[in-house]
Amino acid sequence: MPSESPRELLQTALALAREGDYPAARERLLVLSREIPDFPDVHFYLGLVLDQSGDSVSARAAFEQCLALDPFHDEARRHLRELPAPDAATGTFAPPLAASLGRATVSPPPPPPPQDAGSVGMEPPFERYRVRPAGFWIRTVAVLVDLILLSFAVGPFVMVAMAPFESSLVEIAPMDPEELMELVLQGDEEILWALLLAFLVETTVVFLLHSLAFSFYHYVSGQTPGKRIVGVRVVDQGTLGYLSLGQSVGRYAGSQISGCLCGVGYLMAAFNPEKKALHDYIAGTRVVYSEPVPMSALEMGATALLALIALGYALLRLLDLLL
């Protein structure tokens, strides 16, 4: 076994676990957890094996170690939630299944000594598993994807809201800017009010729908469609977990302040070590690289509806241009 590389140890341990030989798989994973202490998946698989062996105490410790290394490891978090809770009176867990079957149990794995992961043949230092702030450009790409999607999804609602002003706008549409300005300067109140109300209605509808969409996605998963595509996520700066509803709404409101300041609030993300924009400071959030968070049924349905509306409106505009 000492001659095996870490990859071979992991593959051997997983093969043994699939065959049901949990004690042997556990021993190999314990060796690997000491050799490469900052590899979260080793602790995750160790937790699975310990759980299957009936040792909930050790499994809990392994899953918690995995989450300490990778706060976005949702499978580890799910398995941790499914473990039996400690007895309220004694503070201990129910006797593990392994004891009732006559199997030996192991104590929680001790903290492994710090070692250089590169010395054992793996890719040092597992940067893809560490929490890394997302930079300005990757965030810009995510925002552009979201804005393009929302511009089409919001289109039908803007059309309905602007219907009362259609007759006035039809008269104004053929005018060039000079003619329009001349009418305004001459005091044509009808045109002036039509333009003002149309602008206010359109701005309000777009703001409310954008606010609803961004707040919803940041609350349920921290990933808008654009962020999910590029692999980043908005998290609470302290816990690295999900945002509260207040944070989600406040972050979008803060993003409007960032934009109103000639975009300086957004540019802040390019010039500080944590890559935080002004609205991140306002809401107490960070944007970090992350694997896609599993979508809930509610988020999946909302995304499907958003995509259908956007696609339908895009096709409608295309037909309008062609005909």
Image (spheres, rainbow, N blue to C red):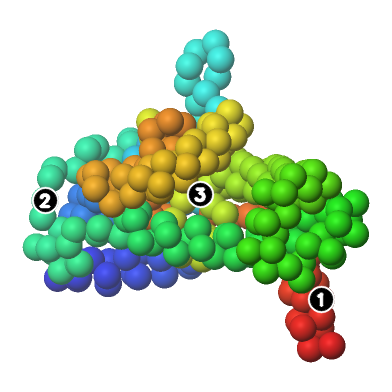
Q: Earlier in the sequence, mark 2 or mark 1?
A: 2
User: Front-most of 16 and 206?
Assistant: 206
Instruction: Out of 139 and 192, give the one closest to the viewer.
Output: 192
Farthest bottom residue in view: 322
Residue that appears at 73% across and 68% down: 175
Q: Whole-Å distance between the Cαs marked 3 and 1?
A: 40 Å
Please tell me which residue is depicted at 19% across the width and 58% down the height of the picture. 125
- 2 to the left or right of 238: left
- Residue neighbourhood size for the residue with mark 3, other residues' Cα within 10 Å, grouped as few (<14), some (14–19), many (≥20): some
Q: Residue furthest top?
A: 89
Q: Earlier in the sequence, mark 3 or mark 2?
A: 3
* Callout 3 secondary element: helix
Residue found at x 74% / y 45%: 187
In the rendered image, which residue does mark 3 sit on? 74
Instruction: Choose the circle earlier in sequence order: 3 or 1.
Output: 3
Give the camera-side residue of 241 and 210. 210
Please tell me whether residue 141 is drawn above or below residue 45 in the rendered image. below
Q: Examine the image and state in which quarter residue 107 appears.
A: top left
The residue to which callout 2 is attached is 115
Residue 74: x %, y % from top left: 50, 49
- Whether residue 75 sits left or right of residue 317 in the image: it is left
Instruction: Identify residue for label 1.
Output: 316
Q: Specify the amino acid type for callout 3.
A: Asp
Amino acid type of the residue that numbered disc 1 sits on in the rendered structure: Leu
Real-space Cα separation, disc 2 to disc 1, in angstroms: 60 Å
Residue 231: horizontal and vertical position, in percent? 45, 61
Question: In this view of the protein, can residue 279 be seen by the observer?
Answer: yes
Furthest residue toward front? 186
Which element carries disc 2, helix, strand or loop? Answer: loop
The percent coordinates of residue 90 (x first, y second) are 50, 13
Secondary structure beneath dot 1 equals helix
